Amino acid sequence: MPQQVQPAQPSAPAFGGLPKPGMNINPAAASRPQFNPNGPTAGTAAIQAPVNRAAAPRAYNVAPSAVSSRAANGDAVLNGTGSKSVLHQLNANRASMGALNRRAIPSGAVTSHANGFVTVQAAGGRQYDLRPDGRLASFSSQGRKAEFRSNGQLGALHTTNMDMVRGVHGERTITVRGPDNSLIVSTGLHSGYVQKQILIQGQPYQQRTVVQNGVVQTRIYSVAVYHGVEMPHYVPAYRFAPAFYGWAFYPWAVPVRYAWDWQSAPWYGQYATYYTPAPAYPAPSMWLTDYYLSQTMANGYQVQMDAAQAPANADLDPSALDHDTYSSDAYAQVITPITPQLKMELSEQVRQQVAAENVASRNPQDATNADSLDRVLVPNHLFVVDQSLSVATAGQQQCGLSAGNVLRLTAVPAADSLSANMVVASSRQSECPAGQQVTVSLVDLQEMQNNLRIQLDAGLLALRAGQGQGGLPKAPKSAIEAPPRPIEELPEGDADALAQLDSAQQQADSEEAQVTAAAFQGNGS
């Protein structure tokens, strides 16, 4: 059975007697910046007001005689005459819209909700949920449910064994669930991972065969329970010498100037106005933070490029979108970049994680606790989004997050909650606006924490290999004389992972075509 996470007590790191250059900082006593509910403090990006596209004007009227019954919450079930009248009004308004939103909704029983939305129960078990102006919000039929953005783009699709979500930049994440609790998660053409349950020394783990940029890796995750939900915890692939963790924890004697080799890469050109590497690094944690951010954004960019190269589906065809509206109900009009202050806060969190990795490397039984959510779900903790997500705002609008967005936790979630309230600290155009409060699932936050540990794993390897080169200071002999060693002897991954990922893409293509046909075939235009 998965283990129940117990709160871990913070402790000062022990680094095998490595001399402590610079300031001797106790990570257990490090203070966190305080969240200001009244606005940003000096040096932070200004909070921008979101553009609100959810409050569409109501394009229909309901006569009192059209109501057959009314619920306590104000929802009104309409009679046959009233249903025909409301649908006539909504379809007339839809006729002036673009493409998908122009197609007629078939006749059926209508419920007018207190918030202006409309539900239509049509023949064949088809259900349509419409926004107040008639734009399609969702459609369900025969075990499929599709969710649509305001511009007619398919935002999500759910079937009995598959979930598909599209990001605001066209990314598509597909999750296919197997009968044996296996998962196939495709994030683009020939990328994603295949997950299955395994046992290591009699203990349950999850193994992911990851395909990314043509490279196949095997990763192992332990399983812990938090708020009643199983959470996968990335198990670092390597342990380093205690002295190396110390060298990566304490400040360097002199700030280091470092030229990253990705500054001419295409992904950085897209993110250049949003993210800038530090001009100099006073400590390894700052260098590791830029490594973590850059790799996260580079991976997100690759997913976007994969989506752009995928065969055109109906909802990606420009002629199938309503260009008078927007893909999200709330979206940013301007870029709110990652500020130096945010970078400093992230750097401190990275430094604390280095200390936790040191403890876990010497005490394997603490490996899961090193990143358990009870450690990091504290007010003001920052999370870096690792993949495209569609989230709800405090006003129940929808907006999109993408890799590299930074979120700040406002309060510890209640013990029975499966999500957390976050404030967007930085984002790009068309994404959730900075300053917007959004609700993010705990599972998604755990995956963001997993990504931190994955990138920290790779960053520590790169830092160790690059010490003494490119301007990086040379590490003491005691820090590098012991080579990194694998934590576990990893079992072989899935040899056909790539074929399974491609199959998931094909399944999603088929399901998208079928749900669109089921919704509008024969409805007229």
Image: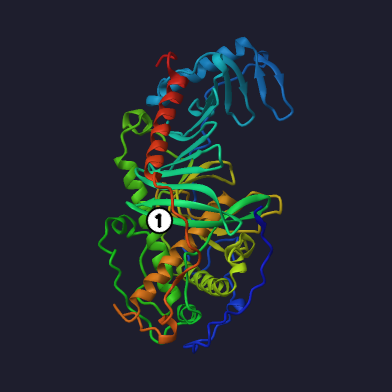
* Coordinates of residue 466 in the picture (x, y in percent): 33, 75
The front one of 6 and 393 is 6
Q: Quadrant of residue 205?
A: bottom right
Q: Is residue 507 visible?
A: yes
Instruction: Report which quarter residue 461 is drawn in.
Output: bottom left
Residue most extreme to the front = 201
> Would you name the residue on which mark 1 appears?
217
The reply, left or right, for residue 260 in relation to residue 440 is: left
Q: Nearer the viewer, residue 400 or 80?
A: 400
Q: Residue furthest left?
A: 264
Q: Quadrant of the C terminus?
A: top left
Q: Kindly tell me whether residue 437 is visible in this rendering.
A: no
Q: How is the image coloured?
A: rainbow
Secondary structure of residue under mark 1:
strand
What residue occupies the far top of the structure in this picture? Answer: 81
For badge 1, the amino acid type reads Gln
Residue 379 image-quadrant placement? bottom right
Q: How many marks?
A: 1
Q: Position of residue 164 (x, y in %)?
A: 47, 37
Number of residues whose C-alpha sits closer than 10 Å to that of mark 1, classed few (under 14), some (14–19) or many (20 or more) = few
371 vs 52: above or below: below
Q: Residue at x 29, y 72 (%)?
A: 259
129 vs 494: above or below: above
User: In the current view of this chain or complex, which residue is farthest to the right?
Assistant: 72
Where is residue 128? Give x, y as percent: 54, 23
Residue 431 appears at what percent x and percent y? 44, 48
